[in-house]
Amino acid sequence: MILVNAPRVAKNSKTYLLECIDTNWLSGEGPFVTRFEKAFAERMGAQHALTTNSGTAALHLALACLDIGPGDEVILPASTMGACYFAIWYCGATAVPVDVDPETYTIDPTALEKAITPKTKAVMAVHLFGHPCDMDAILALKKKYHFLLVEDCAEAHGATYKGKTVGSFGEAACYSFYGNKIITTGEGGMMTTNDDALAARARKMKIFSFNPAKRFTHDEMGFRYTMTNLQAAIGLAQLEELDTAISQKRKMATFYKKNLSHLKGLKLPTEKRQCKSVYWMYTILIDQKTFGLSRDEVMETLLKKFGIQTRSFFFPPQVAFAELHKFDGLTFPVADRIGEQGLYLPSGLGNTPTEFAAVASALDQIASP
């Protein structure tokens, strides 16, 4: 079986984990938490970084600290992970999905502007599949309409827009360190910000909002969103190899582009001139009429005949949340289309060039002549 995203454990992980065990620091108050946060903030160009126990927790924490609540609207792309919606709903706010760009699959600034109302308090810009959003357009709208900006960088660790690292443009940014991410702690996340007051509030809120003058009393609503010292130790080891990981991801993308571009009916990912994608996953769209098979048929054939695991794109909200009936009747032309045609190929840091070659060969074999 060729896994869709095989992880790779950084070389210093075992050394750091043994240090945790030898010093008996296991909880979220251990020294690796501080070391990881400091190093991550420096690498991402942020003043502050706060570890959390998931990317979803980081999103919720950021929104809660920005006082997003009932009556507020948060605009987000119609093609994204459900965690983005849940974080908004946890705050009691309304999630307002808009269509995405047909080339990068990130939020469409034109659709974004049309959705802005007096209730719009924030925009969630998701740097999907490792490619940055159009930040110039989004920042121009932010200046015009004065909304808060939260960047979801879960899939874009180290990606850049005009040379500036994503996650450094808005009030806050959020990262996931789930097992399939470029930096992984197994489970975990991070919130970054350049706002001192926001960082201080988030740091307290993520640990039950304890009153520093009198522990076990609480200033406001609090959460238990801490990362353990064990996870932070792995995260620090992973962060040390980020540049190597990004280079490997881009080599993987170059290989796929070279070996798949001749196949008719496949749309390969785009990298905009001002952007540097980290290619979290290598995405393709399947045009059934030209390629000869539907997206679902391609996925099934790759798995059953070649033992190659793939994943579909995220579904638009009226499909993803059909049972909740929150988006009944809505359509998003681009998000709907890529939700039907899109899949991503094995792309993990633990996947090998031999596996990438096997994937390319399999697609070549099943394509229409």
Image: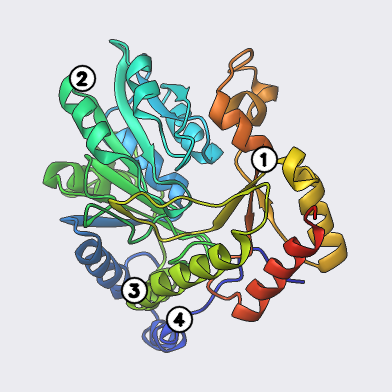
Q: Specify the label residue 341 is tagged with.
A: 1
Which kind of residue does numbered mark 3 sit on? Asp
Around disc 3, counting alpha carbons within 10 Å, would you say few (fewer than 14), some (14 to 19), or many (20 or more)?
Answer: few
Q: To which residue does mark 4 refer?
A: 10
Please state which of residues 133 and 220 is positioned toward the viewer in this rendering: 133
Please state which of residues 361 and 201 is positioned toward the viewer in this rendering: 361
Which kind of residue does numbered mark 2 sit on? Tyr
Q: Which secondary structure, mark 3?
A: helix
First in sequence, mark 4 or 1: give its number: 4
Around disc 1, counting alpha carbons within 10 Å, would you say few (fewer than 14), some (14 to 19), or many (20 or more)?
Answer: many
Q: Label 4 to label 1, Cα distance in Å?
A: 34 Å
| Mark 3 or 1, closer to the camera | 1
Q: Residue furthest front?
A: 369
Which kind of residue does numbered mark 1 sit on? Gln
First in sequence, mark 4 or 3: give its number: 4
Q: To which residue does mark 3 refer?
A: 243
Q: To which residue does mark 2 refer?
A: 145
Q: Which secondary structure, mark 2?
A: helix
